[in-house]
Image (cartoon, rainbow, N blue to C red):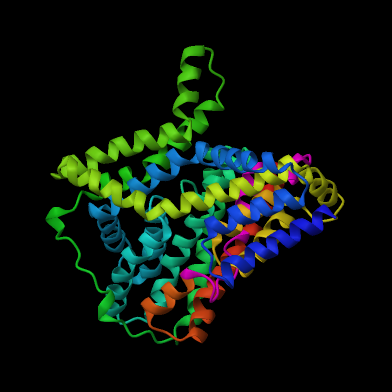
Amino acid sequence: MSLLLIFICIAILVLLITYFKINAFLAFLLVSILAGFLLGIEPVKIIGSVQKGMGDMLGSLIIVVVAGAMLGKLAADSGAAQRIAGGMMNLFGASRIQWALLITGFIIGIPLFYNVGFVLVIPLIFSVAQRYKLPVIYIGVPMLAALSVTHGFLPPHPSPTALVAQFNADMGTTLFYGIIIGFPTSIVAGPIFAKALKKIKAPMLSTFKSVDLPDEQLPGLGISIFSSLLPVILLGLTTVLTMVVIENDFVRTLILFLSDPAVVMILSLAVATYTLGLRMGMKMKRIMDIYVDAVKDITILLLIMGGAGSLKQILVDSGVSDEIATLLNGLDVHPLILGWTIACVIRVCVGSATVAGLTAAGIVLPLLSQPGVDPNLMVLAVGAGSLMFSHVNDSGFWLFKEYFNISIKDTIRSWSLMETIVAIAGIIGVMILDIFVS
């Protein structure tokens, strides 16, 4: 009976978001309270569960997500992302345009949130298409595939960061696995798939043209890449160091402190504040204004994460998580496949990859109690599933359609299928990696 009530609550959540157009944060709150009543939690304890779930979720995430947003915004506004894009184009040349765009999208996609990255790279995609007389969809899909993969797979993006916290995974290990799986996935969904899209015509709208900064105002290529990827560098370095047996307790304690994702992001932001800000002649007030704008951009994402944490806590406090665990443990399906499938279904129904990932997390959390289930791979499995078949209920679908000025049919042929390939290739990569790490 409890499981039926959970399915009803999930269905109500989907209806509130998709049909009634209720904000996802409010929808999570309403459904969390409703679930508390239906699952038999004492009324006076329901709000306490909601608050605890929200606090636990945001307490472990807010520094990482906010600092990541600030770093990404500074990389965009300082011209670092523009410099990386230009440097990659010069390095690869005309014969390897798609690979240049793919690698550029992967690099700048790590610090930039998807919508910011999308708007930032569109002028580059169109300018390259015009310069080399190539179909713009054929040119653009590799870069956007890379952006999508980093959004769904790699911390410090909101959904994978939240999943790391939910599943008690390791941020550095998840990032390492995510890169191993994510880059081949980007290749399959990008340059390989784009070969089938050469005939789609997408006339550029002048509305979406942007003015690039002059070269003399841009930071150098090396410092741009270093500053943008510093979180990756620090997480990777400290992850490796923590696996080394160190006799000195002080050194080991220091490495463990520096390996904390919050510390990594604070250090990275401090370095970027100088290298991409003060060093380039920006006033501190201007830098702080950039950071304020960055926080405004992600406020609703933070609230959605908090709402998802509330629903998860209701499931735990009601005891239904144990019931779900018993049911799922009895299914003859690999836990990673099951987590991916649940995320896929919610993604197709709700539209938002973040909502899909966080909602699925609360359902599949009991699966982690099974022996041999790697929490880092579960993060990636759910993340891959949360990208499945973007269509008309996803804002990313309309962003792609309007910027490229194409029909809904062509958007489904290109964007929706690209996202589907990302989801399928992603879970294949997860299952292959699971052979070696389990």
Query: Does residue 391 appear anywhere in the picture?
Result: yes
Please state which of residues 62 and 150 is positioned toward the viewer in this rendering: 62
Task: Examine the rendered structure and indicate whether residue 9 appears above or below residue 133.
Answer: above
Residue at the limit of the structure toward the right, as seen here: 330
Residue 203 is left or right of residue 214, and the answer is right
Residue 230 is left or right of residue 412, and the answer is left
Task: Examine the rendered structure and indicate whether residue 116 appears above or below residue 394.
Answer: above
Quadrant placement of the C terminus: top right
Please state which of residues 38 and 423 is positioned toward the viewer in this rendering: 38
> What residue appears at the point 24 percent right and 54 percent down from the top-left corner?
77
Task: Examine the rendered structure and indicate whether residue 235 appears above or below residue 324.
Answer: above
> What residue appears at the point 53 percent right and 17 percent down from the top-left corner?
246
> What residue appears at the point 37 percent right and 48 percent down from the top-left corner?
69
Residue 43 picture location, percent across and down: 70, 44
Please state which of residues 326 and 177 is positioned toward the viewer in this rendering: 326
Residue 420 picture location, percent across and down: 59, 70
The verdict on residue 382 being magenta is: yes
The verdict on residue 341 being magenta is: no
> What residue appears at the point 54 percent right and 59 percent down from the top-left corner?
24
Give the image quarter of residue 351: bottom right
Task: Examine the rendered structure and indicate whether residue 398 appears above or below residue 366.
Answer: below
Residue 277 is left or right of residue 113, and the answer is left
Query: Does residue 430 appear anywhere in the picture?
Result: no
Residue 157 is left or right of residue 432, and the answer is left
Q: How many labels, in total? A: 0
Residue 137 picture location, percent across and down: 41, 78
Residue numbers of the magenta segment: 366-395
Quadrant placement of the N terminus: bottom right
